[in-house]
Amino acid sequence: MLLSIAKPTNFGKVLAKLVAAEPKVECYCYTYTVYLDIPVKSMKHMQDALEFLERELALDFNYTFDLPASGIRQFQDQRAQWLMVQALINNDEDPTATCKRTVVGTEMVERVIYKLECSDAEQV
């Protein structure tokens, strides 16, 4: 399945090249998914890493998903569900960063609260 989606290549060599260019990148491998976490100051920085991966693996990272509470923007090729590339945007204290996690409001969520009550079966 992987070879039908990604260009036949040695993923380890691609990862080694990425780590050489981005020493702070972290790789997490789970059963069916590989996560590449890249700390970034700007989306231009992230775009360079994505273009490298697209070129080396013949993928197209055309889907994004934001996890704002965590400061993560996730990139994925819809055909390659096994690889998630995540931009870590936790630069709250860095004045040179162009990407920052900002609080834009608060949300109140109304939730039903349950209590378990049982009647006494011995009542006459």
Image: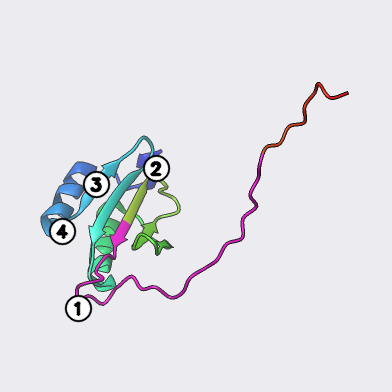
The residue indicated by pointer 1 is: 95
Q: Amino acid at mark 1?
A: Pro
Pick the front one: 3 or 11 = 11
Residue 22, numbered label: 4
Q: How is the image coloured?
A: rainbow
Which comes sooner in the sequence, label 2 or label 4?
2
Q: CA distance from mark 3 to mark 2?
A: 22 Å
Q: Amino acid at mark 3?
A: Cys
Q: Tell me if residue 91 is in the magenta stretch.
A: yes
Magenta stretch secondary structure, dominant: loop
Whole-percent x, y for residue 24 in the image = 16, 56
Which comes sooner in the sequence, label 2 or label 1?
2
Q: Closer to the camera: disc 3 or disc 1?
A: 1
Whole-percent x, y for residue 40 in the image = 23, 66
Discs 3, 1 touching: Cβ within 8 Å: no
Q: The residue tagged with tag 3: helix, strand or loop?
A: strand
Pick the front one: 41 or 105 = 105
Q: CA distance from mark 3 to mark 1?
A: 27 Å
Q: Closer to the camera: disc 1 or disc 4?
A: 1
Q: Amino acid at mark 4?
A: Glu
Q: Quadrant of the C terminus?
A: top right
Residue drawn at (77%, 27%), measured in percent from left and top?
Answer: 120
In the image, the segment drawn in magenta is 86-115
Q: Quadrant of residue 109?
A: bottom right
Discs 1, 4 touching: Cβ within 8 Å: no
Q: The residue tagged with tag 4: helix, strand or loop?
A: loop
Pick the front one: 104 or 96 = 104
